[in-house]
Every structure is written in C-alpha cells, then in structure tokens.
Image (cartoon, rainbow, N blue to C red):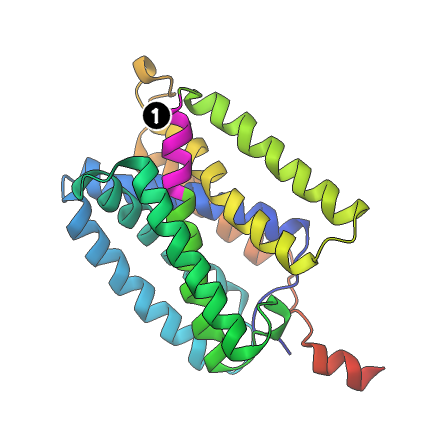
Amino acid sequence: MSKVPQVTVLFWIIKILCTTLGETGGDAVTMSMNLGYLVGTLIFAAFFVVFVCAQVYAKKFHPLLYWITIIATTTVGTTMADFSDRSLGIGYAGGSLLLLGLLMASLGLWYWTMGSVSVDTVSTPKVEVFYWVTIMFSQTLGTALGDWTADSEGLGYGGGVVFFGALLVVVAALHFWTKISKTVLFWAAFILTRPLGAVVGDLLDKPLSDGGLNLSRYSASAVLLILVFAFILILPQKAGKHPSTEEKAG
C-alpha cells in the first residue's frame, strides 16, 4: 500500500487548509514574534526534518502524521520563500524562478532514478524522500508565486484568490475531460493550491489598508489548525493503492 492518502475531494480541502495555515503560521513566527525569516526557517526546517523522518520510518499510512508533515512543509515553505524573496534581495520573480528550477530538478531526478513521479508509488523510503523534498520545493514555490501575483502584479489578495482558484478549476476540468497525464495534473494542482493558500492567508491577516481582513495571525492559525484536525479525525481517509497491489488484485 502507498503511504500517502487517496487523492479525493477531501484531500484537496485539507491541503488548501494546510497551505493557508502554513502562511498564517509562518508569518506569526517570523513577523508577529519578530524572529525574522532566517530564524523562522531554521525552526520550521527542524520540524520538517523530524516529521519527514517519522513519516519515512512509519510502516504504514497514518493520516495524522501525514498531514502534520504537510503542515511542516507549508510553514517552512513560507519562511524559505520569504527569506529568498526579501532577505536575499532577489525579489518575487527571482525567487519564483529559482524555486521553479529546484522543483523541476527534484522531479527530474526522481523520475530519472525511479522511472515515475506518481504519488501512487510512494511506498518505500527512497521514493518518500523524493516525494517530501519535491513537496517542500512546491510549497516554497507556491508561496513565492502567491506573493508575486498579489503584491508585485497588483492583483491584490482577493484577486489572487480568484486567479489561482480559476487555474485550479481549469486543472480539474482537464482531469475529468481530457487524457492529459493524471500525474502531471496532480502536481500542477498540488503546486497551485499553495499560492491559493498563501493569498487566502494574507487576505485573512494583512491590514485593512493593504486589502486584508486584519485578523490576528495567532487566532487565524488556531482556527485553521482546528479545522484541519477536525477533518482528519472525523472523516476517514484511506491510503492510496500502489500499482503493484492493483496488478495482484487483478
């Protein structure tokens, strides 16, 4: 069996909640606590390493562990993107291009080594390492893209929500009505849910003068965390099926 959940509507709902939490939670540590992007990145990177190791060494799929690890990738993705965009001075465009290159390199090395980047094959430690590194880069890229479109390109946070929401609708339509690779569309959707979460998070906690709702980052993060855990604990999730399992069943 795969060690990641089946990709269902519930999967995408929780994913968007986690990416939004990553934005508000990351900003709470780096901005509200005034720890800065570098310190915030080091803190969340430590959490990321701990939970990825726990996920890799787990013998089977554990929904709570999986989604906590996803949250770890979204928070470290937020602080890493902010650090590269702002502290390194390369801007949103430069940061997005750098992170896109790292994401493509991760996917390329994964495919070259294992012959597939399908999430259905995530069942061994080696594949899991590729999976989580790729996810971490996708989360970081998504944060940079969200900030770029909302801030630099003038869409604003509400406009960013509409823009990335529309792109996800297009990906969903391609999934249901075309023969485009489901693996390609999965990763496209996975990447796009991150900037959507980023702009939703900014919409919640940015000042009214900047187009946000001026909610507390702490309270917004707490509510999002409660929602994530509620979905995980109340609604059942199953592990995805590894291709070899399906072949044996057939």
Is the residue 54 above or below the residue 164 in the image? below
Seen at 21% across and 57% down, the residue is 43
Can you tell which quarter of the image residue 104 is in? bottom left
Q: Answer above or below: position of 62 versus 201.
A: below
Q: Residue furthest bottom?
A: 248
Q: Which SS does the magenta portion mostly show? A: helix
Image coordinates of residue 179 in percent, x first then y, are 78, 53
Give the amino acid type for the residue marked by disc 1 in the picture: Ser
Q: Quadrant of the C terminus?
A: bottom right
Residue 146 belongs to magenta span: yes
- What is the secondary structure assignment of the residue under circle 1? helix
Q: Which region of the structure is painted magenta?
A: 143-153
Image: 120 above or below 214: below
Tag 1 residue: 152
Residue 60 point in image, percent of width and height? 55, 79
Give the residue displayed 54% in from the left and 71% down from the top: 111
The N terminus sits in image quarter = bottom right
List the single residue furthest toward the right: 250
Q: Is residue 63 above or below residue 186?
A: below
Tell me if mark 1 has few (under 14), some (14-19) or many (20+) residues whose alpha carbon lies within 10 angstroms of its own: few
Residue beneath the point at 64% across and 62% down: 237
Q: Can residue 65 be seen by looking at this rendering? A: no
